[in-house]
Amino acid sequence: MSEKTILIIGGGIAGLSAGCYGRMNGYQTKIFELHSISGGLCTGWKRKGYTIDGCIHWLVGSRPGSGMHALWDELGVLNGVKIVNHEEFVRVRGTDGREFIVYTNVDRLEAHMLALSPQDAVQIKTLTGAIRKFSKFDPMQDNSSPLSGIKMLFTMLPFLGLFKKFGSLTVSEFAGGFKDPLLRQGLVDILGFPGFSLLGLIMTLAWMHAENAGYPIGGSLPFAHAFERRYRELGGEIEFNTRVEKILVENGQAVGLRLADGREVRGDRIISAADGHATLYSMLDGQYLTDELKEMYTTWPIFDPLIQVSLGVNRDLSAAPHAINVHLKKPVHIAGVERDVLSYKHYAYDPTLAPAGKTVVEVMLSSSYAYWKELAEDRERYDAAKQQVALQVIEQLEAVLPGISGQIEMVDVATPLTYERFTGNWQGSFEGWQYTKEAMSRTMQGKSISKTLPGLENFYMIGQWTEPGGGLPPALTSARAIISQICKKDKRAFVSKKTQ
Ligand SMILES: Cc1cc2nc3c(=O)[nH]c(=O)nc-3n(C[C@H](O)[C@H](O)[C@H](O)COP(=O)(O)OP(=O)(O)OC[C@H]3O[C@@H](n4cnc5c(N)ncnc54)[C@H](O)[C@@H]3O)c2cc1C
């Protein structure tokens, strides 16, 4: 049987996963990636002997035996990787010096919250009760068979009441019911998005409690490269430094790609695992936009772009809490926004990222894409603004970690434009669509974002812009589901071959 060809735009986790499953199912696959390395947003970079991690804080499916782990296992990307499950998710330090410690173990969390605010016992137990129940919810399962939907329904059945109860609330709506100001603010700070679905927060804490959302030692880049390794072992091809400009369409069928260097490549199926906006509005010239897609790209909130300040410090921080949100007594203006919270974390728990006795410290601030876009018109102003952000962050950190300014050996600042330049993501967003209560409600009604376009045959979209909430698991699962759909169309039984 001659192999049909699948052309894949983008070598992030979704594109690499599509490549792996495509190869397992006998397709010839070729990935076109604009950057010089694979991984997309799942990346890391080296500076002065330190490795800056650009992605994984927690990886759902890190626990062997969980539904999502079985899928990472199919691609072998966690083979031999040591996982760290933190005791604390984050600490929130209030202006009065009290600390709300978000323990990952729910019993510890409950006891700590009750000690902080006995008057909030009802709200606290509502939250911790839901976390306990959802820690038994394991939704990421094989999505390739016709029975998958039914299996998923059975998995969800015992939780439907909880979905209904918590799915209609945002984190800030729920937090507003707390009397204690530290808990009220601290809950919103855990993920940092007030409009985030409460259920999203509950599930995150449930995964933590179940030790199913750990951190893989080595960080994001080796994780991404494990996908590329597997893809190449399976015989897949990848072309770097190659930007796809247009998707070629003939008689309502996607038939190939036009590359930035002018070449045209033909294929039987086209998958875009690249940015959703660029795919729809630029590569397809806005020709296949449905009303729903237009609404999404004009009204749905995206994860705000970030400034990531990374510092290499000549200090062992392993005894310090790894993630803290500090409420500032006096707000500071950074990158055009008044800020009253500074969130920082360090990576002392991963010895591969810094020389012995030294640590990478990271501060992430949400920031406006337009602010940096305007600054970038003048390179000097842009660089000066980056430097200014770093200086302000260091000044604030000095109050939390006295002496740190004298121990800094490396400073690196990434802006929303950095994310855009290296990954092509719209507005520099780092995870696509926010998981709002509206998105949650759509999920509960069984509505997903369509991965095909009406009037365009042989074309598919996968990755973070096709799954609200984004993240690494949907990058893999969306790819796997599409390859299974393509197999069905080609009357082939979908197969997935686990690594030995
Ligand atoms: C700071 C940060 C923290 C995160 N933390 C977590 C976490 O803890 N857990 C988690 O699960 N997720 C996390 N994420 C999110 C996760 O990294 C992403 O959701 C996921 O990697 C998206 O994968 P993707 O393949 O869908 O898209 P991308 O990674 O964006 O990949 C798209 C690829 O397409 C390429 N491309 C774009 N346009 C073109 C073109 N025209 N031609 C050719 N190639 C093109 C890009 O270069 C890129 O490689 C985090 C992300 C960031 C930035």
Image (tube, rainbow, N blue to C red):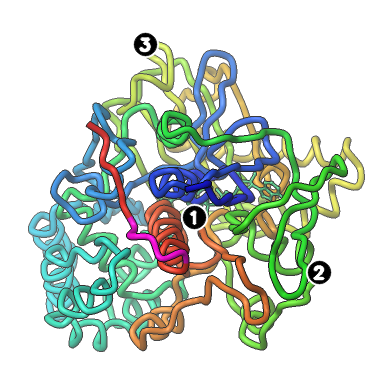
At a point 42% along the width and 29% down the height, the residue shown is 233
Q: Amino acid at mark 2?
A: Asp
Please give the range of residues in magenta.
490-494
152 over 63 or under it: above or below: below
Query: The residue under label 3 is which amino acid type?
Result: Ala
Separation of residues labelled 2 and 1 (CA atoms): 41 Å
Query: Depth-wise, is mark 3 or mark 1 nearer the camera?
Result: 3
**Residue 370 within the magenta-colored segment of the rendering:** no
Q: Nearer the viewer, residue 31 or 442?
A: 31
- Which is more toward the observer, 366 or 80? 80
Residue 131, horizontal then vertical, whole percent: 17, 67
Q: Residues within 10 Å of mark 2 (few under 14, many from 20)?
A: few
Q: Which residue is mark 3?
A: 356
Three-letter amino acid code at the position of disc 1: Val
Residue 191's image quarter? bottom left
Q: Quickly name the residue at label 2.
A: 285
Q: Residue 424 at what x, y percent from top left?
A: 69, 50
As rendered, which of 259 and 212 lies closer to the eye? 259
Q: What label sits on residue 341 in the rendered view?
A: 1
